Amino acid sequence: MLTVILADRKINPDIRIYTLDSEKFAMSDLISNDTDKPIRPFKWDIFREHFEREGPKIIPNLTFNVKNIIY
């Protein structure tokens, strides 16, 4: 993933921001009272510039696992 972003930065040196957009989920999906059951993974896409401004998607369907929640 990092190599894709670094390669994209070489091609687009003026770009200074990359954003993440996740699948929709409820905050309760981040809570697991069962220590044997991990918090479910989430799908994310990485965009060059702002995803809200329809920047190009450079890495689709990344899976992220939540390891720690601070609140």
Image (tube, rainbow, N blue to C red):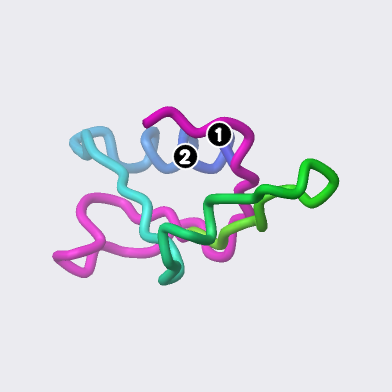
The residue depicted at 21 percent of the width and 69 percent of the height is 54
Disc 2 marks a residue whose amino acid type is Ile
At mark 2, the secondary structure is helix
37 or 57, which is in the foreground? Answer: 37
Are there few (<14), some (14-19), or many (20+) residues within 10 Å of tag 1? Answer: few
Q: Check residue 11 for magenta coloring.
A: no
The answer to whether residue 70 is left or right of residue 31 is left
Could you tell me if the residues under marks 2 and 1 are in contact, i.e. CB atoms within 8 Å?
Answer: yes
Q: Position of residue 24 (x, y in %)?
A: 41, 71
23 or 18, which is in the foreground? Answer: 23
The residue depicted at 42 percent of the width and 66 percent of the height is 26
Q: Position of residue 27 (x, y in %)?
A: 41, 58
* Corner quadrant of residue 40: bottom right
Disc 1 marks a residue whose amino acid type is Leu
The residue depicted at 75 percent of the width and 49 percent of the height is 34
Spatial CA distance of label 2 from label 1 is: 5 Å
Q: Position of residue 60 (x, y in %)?
A: 53, 64
**Which residue extends farthest left?**
53
At mark 1, the secondary structure is helix
The answer to whether residue 12 is left or right of residue 63 is left
Q: Vertical placement of 1 versus 31: above or below?
A: above
Dividing the image into 4 quarters, which one contains the C terminus?
A: top left
Dividing the image into 4 quarters, which one contains the N terminus?
A: top right
Magenta segment: 45-71
Are there few (<14), some (14-19), or many (20+) residues within 10 Å of tag 2? Answer: some
The answer to whether residue 14 is left or right of residue 40 is left
Q: Residue 2 shows which numbered tag?
A: 1
Q: Residue 5 shows which numbered tag?
A: 2
Q: Vertical placement of 8 versus 30: above or below?
A: above
The residue depicted at 43 percent of the width and 28 percent of the height is 70
Q: Residue 17 shows which numbered tag?
A: none
